[in-house]
């Protein structure tokens, strides 16, 4: 939609948004002076928006939206963010409009509700989503995304982010920090699972092993250890394949349900949770398949190499919740 047409549509809907309606739960109960100030700010913000001064109009619309709890003012906030190229912030603003108008289906807010839904559908392919989870949550844990703290209530839920590279870090007392760098494309959802290791366990893992004289006995022990590692990797592979099967079936069930309820495609807020759940399950299924195949291949290789009698060696190193297995030998 061209900016001129956008202004025309929104102006008619938004003029009434700053009017006092004490019985409306979407709005607070501002004083008369606050309402007068909000009306003046709203008019000034509209003028700035119409001439393309979106950065100047944004703080005025934000203040009006907070003062009056007006979905129409919040709709303007989303369009300002969109015009400034801040697509993730625009998505969050439009999402808040949908939640506000869904909580109180007042006819005067129906145009704002429909406009926000339409914008969310368009922005879905222009933003990414991250689901951040911890294998365990120690006391005092702090998780940040690109340096910004993540609320505990947002853990395990999809977080809207701009496409590109993102840095996730988790810290807590008595544990080794865990961090992960991830790239997310527009329209993509990725799940990141962080594992925090106690400092005592981390020191034990990275402690150097004592040097041993190479002998037939040491080679035999090394081969047995390699075969044992191979069996463990194979077990992990089987678990990954199992995860692929279970998550894949659950994702299919969720998408089948959405297809039955919305043959033409679901865009309303009532189905957002089901859509996110289906995408998370699909991501888990794909991750399970990749992990399963890689682990099974690694397990088979280690078991075969573990039977060799020639001079060889295996080293295992861990860092930041991840691990690497390296094998060297003579053939």
Image (cartoon, rainbow, N blue to C red):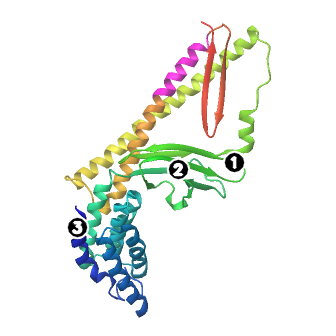
Q: Seen in the image, is 266 located left or right of residue 68?
A: left
Seen in the picture, residue 170 relative to 294 is either above or below; the reply is below
Does the magenta run of residues contain 302? yes
Q: Seen in the image, is 261 located left or right of residue 86?
A: left
Seen in the picture, residue 189 relative to 319 is either above or below; the reply is below
Disc 2: which residue: 133
Which numbered circle lies on residue 175? 1
Q: In the image, residue 176 lies at what x, y percent?
A: 68, 45
Q: In the image, residue 237 lies at what x, y percent?
A: 50, 29
Q: Residue at x 66, y 57 (%)?
A: 139
Sequence-first disc among 1 and 3? 3
Which numbered circle lies on residue 74? none
Disc 3: which residue: 4
Q: Please report the bounds of the magenta region as a residue range.
A: 293-307
Sequence-first disc among 2 and 1? 2
Q: CA distance from mark 2 to mark 1?
A: 16 Å
Q: In the image, residue 128 lies at what x, y percent?
A: 40, 50
Q: CA distance from mark 1 to mark 3?
A: 55 Å
The answer to which image quadrant residue 226 occupies is top right
Q: Residue at x 41, y 39 (%)?
A: 285
**Can you tell which of label 3 and label 2 is closer to the viewer?**
3
């Amino acid at each position: 939609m061209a900016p001129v047409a956008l202004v025309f549509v929104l102006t008619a809907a938004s003029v009434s948004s700053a009017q006092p309606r004490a019985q409306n739960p979407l709005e607070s109960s501002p004083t008369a002076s606050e309402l007068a100030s909000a009306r003046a700010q709203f008019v000034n913000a509209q003028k700035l928006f119409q001439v393309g001064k979106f950065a100047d109009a944004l703080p005025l619309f934000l203040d009006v939206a907070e003062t009056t709890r007006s979905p129409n003012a919040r709709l303007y906030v989303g369009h300002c963010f969109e015009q400034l190229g801040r697509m993730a912030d625009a998505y969050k603003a439009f999402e808040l409009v949908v939640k506000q108008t869904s909580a109180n289906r007042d006819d005067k807010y129906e145009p704002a509700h429909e406009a926000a839904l339409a914008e969310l559908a368009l922005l879905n392919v222009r933003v990414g989503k991250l689901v951040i989870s911890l294998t365990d949550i120690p006391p005092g844990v702090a998780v940040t995304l690109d340096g910004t703290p993540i609320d505990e209530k947002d853990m395990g839920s999809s977080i809207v982010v701009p496409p590109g590279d993102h840095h996730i870090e988790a810290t807590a007392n008595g544990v080794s920090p865990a961090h992960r760098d991830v790239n997310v494309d527009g329209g993509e959802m990725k799940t990141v699972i962080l594992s925090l290791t106690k400092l005592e366990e981390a020191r034990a893992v990275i402690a150097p092993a004592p040097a041993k004289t190479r002998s037939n006995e040491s080679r035999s022990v090394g081969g047995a250890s390699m075969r044992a590692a191979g069996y463990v990797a194979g077990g992990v592979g089987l678990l990954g394949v199992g995860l692929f099967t279970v998550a894949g079936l659950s994702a299919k069930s969720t998408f089948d349900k959405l297809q039955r309820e919305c043959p033409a495609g679901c865009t309303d807020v009532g189905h957002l949770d089901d859509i996110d759940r289906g995408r998370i399950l699909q991501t888990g299924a794909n991750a399970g398949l990749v992990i399963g195949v890689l682990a099974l291949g690694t397990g088979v290789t280690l078991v075969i190499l573990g039977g060799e009698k020639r001079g060889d060696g295996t080293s295992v190193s861990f860092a930041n919740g991840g691990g690497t297995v390296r094998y060297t030998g003579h053939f």
